[in-house]
Amino acid sequence: MRLKLCNIVPGEEHPVTSKMCFHMVQPKGIFHFLIVSGIAIMLAACNAAKAPQKPGKVRLAKIVVDSAQLENYKTLLKEEIEASIAKEAGVLTLYAVFEKERPTHLTILEIYATEEAYQAHLKTTHFLKYKNGTAHMVRELELVETDPLVPELKIK
Amino acid sequence: MRLKLCNIVPGEEHPVTSKMCFHMVQPKGIFHFLIVSGIAIMLAACNAAKAPQKPGKVRLAKIVVDSAQLENYKTLLKEEIEASIAKEAGVLTLYAVFEKERPTHLTILEIYATEEAYQAHLKTTHFLKYKNGTAHMVRELELVETDPLVPELKIK
């Protein structure tokens, strides 16, 4: 919408108000475009964050820990999980659960975007710190490759 | 910003242009308020969807299925998982994985918002359909209560 404040030549004085006349071009079109674009981008970003992502590697790690080292082990594992999730886009989850009746037995549901993301994960300093730091605490380790039934499922 | 098109009484003719004068009050303040409010609400909704939720019940279901019934079993389990996730706010995930080397062995990471949500889940028609429909297909079932290490962790 173009809006003229008066109908005389821009730059001349208004005959009644003695104020300088000018054309005021309201950039509403651009403004609306920017607003609508901004909203669209935000919604897209919001949806992208929720969009189903079919993972390339889903695994169970079944681990038995030395009971004398359980708390130390948990501290190191928690640190490693939090660093992996925060720093590695390809690590989709490392959901670790300890059995209530056998607290030294844990299972980790490991979901990686791709095999490459997993291979990169193995080389990170936070993973190596965990791996080397807990080597003497781990009594048993079984890595079980799996096929997820609903691969894109999330945790609400 | 209030913008007067001319400085004479609204409703009278402009002395030069002979056009009707009027005050045009641009509702920019309201417009901006609505835009900013809208953006804030969208961001809040987006963040709420991602907000960490500490679950009240986290369990592993370890199941062995009759190999002759595996595909039928998968069909019924998938239907039950998708219905539970869609219809029950308190069912946070039912992430089922089948072992590649022993395809009849599966583990389900079950996360419920609360014990009450789990009890309600047991009474739903979709759960009962799965339970009754697969009873003759399940060879072994072990339900393992667990303590998650990072309870609020999600799947990206």
Image: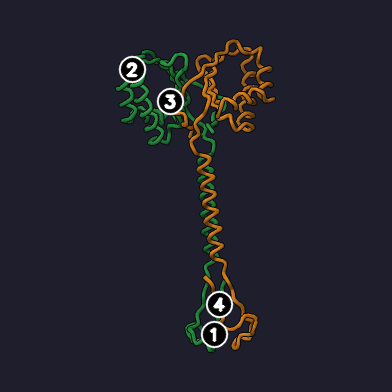
Chain colours: A green, B orange
Q: Can residue A147 be seen in this snapshot? A: no
What residue would you read off at disc 3? B149
Could you tell whether A85 is left or right of B136 in the image? Answer: left
Do circles 1 and 3 both sit on a common chain? no
Position of residue A30 relative to residue A147, above or below, is below
Marks 1 and 2 sit apart, C-alpha to C-alpha, by: 87 Å
Check disc 4 and give the amino acid type.
Lys
Asked if B80 appears above or below A16 in the picture, the reply is above
- Are discs 4 and 2 both within one chain? no
Q: Secondary structure at mark 2?
A: helix
Task: Decide: few, some or many residues near mark 1? Use Cα within 10 Å; few <14, some 14-19, many ≥20.
Answer: some
Which mark is first along the chain, 3 or 4? 4
Q: Nearer the viewer, mark 1 or mark 2?
A: 2
Q: Bin the neighbour count of mark 2 within 10 Å (Cα to Cα): few under 14, some 14-19, many 20 and up.
A: some
Closer to us: mark 1 or mark 3? 3
* Residue at the extreme top of the image, as rendered: B139
Residue located farthest toward the front when viewing the structure as drawn: B116
Q: Position of residue A117 (x, y in %)?
A: 41, 31
Residue A52, visible in the rendered structure? yes
Rendered location of residue A82, percent (x, y): 39, 32
Name which of mark 1 and mark 2 comes first in the sequence.
Answer: 1
The image's mark for residue A69 is: 2
SS for tag 4? strand
Where residue A35 appears, x then y in whole percent?
53, 58
Q: Which mark is residue A8?
A: 1
Q: Amino acid at mark 3?
A: Leu
* Amino acid type of the residue that numbered disc 2 sits on in the rendered structure: Gln
What is the distance, in whole Å, between disc 4 and disc 3 at their CAs?
Answer: 65 Å
Crowd band around label 4 with a 10 angstrom C-alpha radius: few (<14), some (14–19), many (20+):
some
Which residue is tagged 4?
B4
